[in-house]
Amino acid sequence: MKESPAPNGTRSFVVIGETNLARRVCASLREGRHAVQHLAHPGDEDLRAAVSTGPAGIAVLLHEDAAALRYALAVAHMTTRIPTVVTIFDRTMADELLRLLPHCDVTSPAELVAPALAGPCVDAELAALHRHGPRARAVWAAGTVPVTGWWQPERIRWRPRLSRLTGQLRPHDAGTRIMLAGMTGMLAALLGDWAWLLTLGHHGAEAFFDAARVVATVGPAAAPADSTVYQVVSSVVMLSTVVFSAMFTAGVVDRMLSPRLVDLIGPRTVPRSGHVIVVGMGQVGLRLCGELRRLGVPVVGVERDPHAPNVRLARSLGIPVMAGHGGDRAVLERLHLDRARALAAVGSDDLDNIAVAITAHGVSPGTRIVLRAGEHEAIAETRSLLPLGTIRDVTSLAAAYVLARLSGKPATGVVAHRHGTFVESPEEGLTAWPLAAREGCSHIDVVASA
């Protein structure tokens, strides 16, 4: 590990955006004795004036991808000689912008922090973990300095497959339970009537035909004359089948009209053990789910809004998502929190993540908790009262990466360890990167909510 060297000489930088990330980068640059032009929403003339001063680097740090794209293209139109760092969450848009502007460093905070969140979700001794080719590359939280190494998957490879297998045909909501109950009732009536007719000497095909007629409520083709009991029972079965078929139809209609976020059969079923529950399917939650899936770890997401854009994307990626509030005890119990490997609360609101962590701790005290945080005071206050779990500051990690790229360091990743932030580069490995508090930025007074 090497300490980040102090910059030689004062340089000027331009920071665009009023986000917490922009304020953190601005404060850290100012603490490093650099001159910073911090512009919240500059117009064309303001941007042209800032670029004309010849800054050493430009950072476009916004929440809205369209606005970030617009500023990146405007800067590239004015000059291509100034190193530019742009944060864009959408991967397709980021790849296309990088193709159009090769001199730009296009990154996503969600992409950066996914390994740092996946590590403690899989193992308490891991500071970061991500798929690197055919193997998983890990950063171990050993001592005071994280250590990079290769993480070997579990020897028991059948556990994820067993979890997925036991999750088949498991009801996850009221509509699904009604549908399965109706289907089970009709199948029981069909098999029971067919078996009874076989005992009465009917041919197999004929018995099945008559049993199907009973389930269809049109009666057997020819009721046995010597079996009054069968006639009474088949009549009761036909009346019961009316209820079962109504239940089955209601369940099917409910699944057809509501967003199908979880399947009954297939890879998008809810795992029952050894899985990770990801609460909050925003950009960070979606990237974390994708990273865990690539590592072979069963995962299920929780999102309050079943119509959120990332929920549809998760469905296309084969990630099961439960619609509900992660702080609801009933939701966590249905997701088998007591048998889960970990729970990751990665919503954009720190207070919601704290509420989820406290509820999860009450439902299953032994389950590992991983939280996404920014710099909300509630995190520090609550941490002093009870152990929340492993906390990952998304803003700090992204700020360290942006600062490293602005300083010319070929950063490839960021790692959090013991309240410190480390930047990884091919030449120097893991380097401690000190950061200033966002209050050190005096340019932006009001910060838009994340």
Image (cartoon, rainbow, N blue to C red):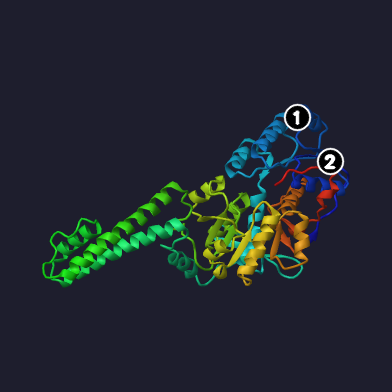
Q: Is residue 277 visible?
A: yes
Vertical placement of residue 358 versus 69, above or below? below
In what element is the residue under mark 2?
A: loop
Q: Which residue is mark 1?
A: 43
In what element is the residue under mark 1?
A: loop
- 86 or 250: nearer the eye? 250
- Residue at left offset 41%, top offset 48%: 256
How much space separates mark 1 and mark 2, taking CA atoms?
Answer: 17 Å
- 39 or 58: nearer the eye? 39
Q: Which residue is mark 2?
A: 443
Residue 337 percent across, percent down from the top left: 56, 67
Amino acid on which disc 1 is placed:
Gly
Label 1: how many Cα within 10 Å (few below 14, some 14–19, many 20+): few
Vertical placement of residue 90 versus 232, above or below? above
Residue 376 percent across, percent down from the top left: 76, 54
- Residue at left offset 55%, top offset 63%: 330
Side of 94 where 58 appears, left or right: right
Quadrant in the picture for residue 423: bottom right
- 445 or 81: nearer the eye? 445
Side of 49 where 367 appears, left or right: left
Residue 283 percent across, percent down from the top left: 61, 49
Q: Is residue 127 visible?
A: no
Quadrant in the picture for residue 94: top right
- Residue at left offset 43%, top offset 47%: 257
Side of 123 where 396 appears, left or right: right
Residue 166 percent across, percent down from the top left: 44, 67
Amino acid on which disc 2 is placed:
His
- 336 or 217: nearer the eye? 217
Label 2: how many Cα within 10 Å (few below 14, some 14–19, many 20+): some
The numbered mark, 1 or 2, whose residue comes first in the sequence reads 1
Quadrant, the N terminus: bottom right
Cβ–Cβ under 8 Å for marks 1 and 2: no
